[in-house]
Amino acid sequence: MDLAFLLHALIPSWFSVAILATFFTYLAIVGSVLPGKVVSGVILQDGTRLHYRCNGLLSLLVLVGLLGIGAKMNYISPTVISDRGFELLSTILAFSFLVTLILYAAGCKSSNQGSSLKPHLTGSLIHDWWFGIQLNPQCMGIDLKFFFVRAGMMGWLLINLSVLARSIQDSTVSGSMILYQLFCVLYILDYFVYEEYMTSTWDIIAERLGFMLVFGDLVWIPFTFSIQGWWLLSNKPELTTAAVIANCFVFLMGYLVFRGANKQKHVFKKNPKALIWGKPPKVIGGKLLASGFWGVARHCNYLGDLLLALSFSLPCGISSPIPYFYPVYLLILLIWRERRDEARCALKYKEVWAEYCRLVPWRILPYFY
């Protein structure tokens, strides 16, 4: 691929704008009308709480079904995303810049003093644009933070399915492609099955909505998490049976740790007396869970996330570093994020956090870090 072709492919088109507009419109409509469990968010500082309609799984299944019917009837091409990947990337990147500038301007003009919409200005335009100035901005009653992360996860699956369709058309489907696609489908479906757990994550309850989150949700998740699939379109590594078994083991261990840790945290926040691994939970200062996975490492869920990221790349073999961009990047990100979390928790919980650190000395990987 030469530079001239790449630059031309990155030019947004009105067709790519139409694709994204249709996608966002669909999500906005079905997110509001399809049935789903309504989950109460955490109680905010002003005593209010948001409510989230967790119908992401049904929305995703309906969308994939509609796209499948459209492809069967030749109304749409199943490879449209893989054929226009670069221009879709540049279009969604431009959208991320635009929407965060609008969020910044709207936040600056807001006089709302509620926890969700109260503007937090530092005086630095770049800082406030990057990290955001409002906790939970909305548009036409839609919580944008929850909306964008849902769009990113669905976008990841749609890219993968389009890449798979291209691989089928080109007769280049390999065992590695099937393994990668299987792991990603399981992970994404699991996310939407347990979508309500997202309402108690740090991103939702503490991070303000700025370019960092919008770019992460709409650009980084779908387009970098799918790098392995793009790479497998033009590469066909040979995996031994032992390598496949080992890859499946890494995925399974990562899933058990990731899902188990997040489930324990979510259940604890809803019911602090719920049993953890069949025993009453150990709680520090009446606030911090120190049982189960959270008694093994202070950010044990990050370990599960890293193992899952590694399992997505292992089907590509070890002939190229390109498919390992995601797990390497994620390692750097999570260490940086863990440091931010530690600083915030130390400030918020003070001596309670210090006691938790003494009881659980390991940050992510026991006996190593």
Image (cartoon, rainbow, N blue to C red):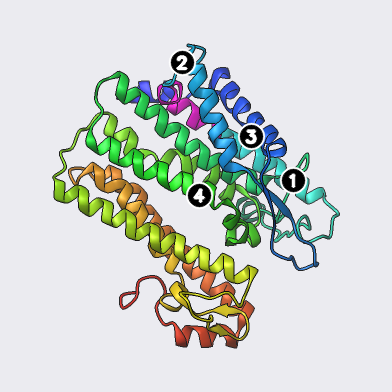
The single residue placed furthest to the top in the displayed view is 74
Of tags 2 and 3, the one toward the viewer is 2
Q: Which mark is residue 368?
A: none
Residue 123 visible: yes
Residue 229 sits in which quadrant? top left
Amino acid type of the residue that numbered disc 1 sits on in the rendered structure:
Gln
Q: Report, in whole angstroms, how far the alpha carbon at label 4 lies from the one at label 1.
A: 23 Å
Q: Report, in whole angstroms, how far the alpha carbon at label 1 lies from the one at label 3.
A: 15 Å
Q: Nearer the viewer, residue 144 or 280?
A: 280
Q: Which mark is residue 72?
A: 2
Assign a secondary structure to mark 4.
Answer: helix
Percent coordinates x, y for residue 54 in the rendering = 64, 47
Which residue carries the number 1 mark?
Answer: 138
Mark 4 / mark 1, whichever is N-terminal? 1
Amino acid type of the residue that numbered disc 3 sits on in the rendered structure:
Leu
Q: Which residues are magenta?
A: 80-92
Assign a secondary structure to mark 3.
Answer: helix
Residue 206 sits in which quadrant? bottom right
Residue positioned 31% across, 19% down in the render? 169
Q: Report, in whole angstroms, how far the alpha carbon at label 2 lies from the one at label 1.
A: 37 Å
Residue positioned 59% across, 24% down in the render? 17
Q: Report, in whole angstroms, how far the alpha carbon at label 4 lies from the one at label 2.
A: 28 Å
Q: Which mark is residue 27?
A: 3
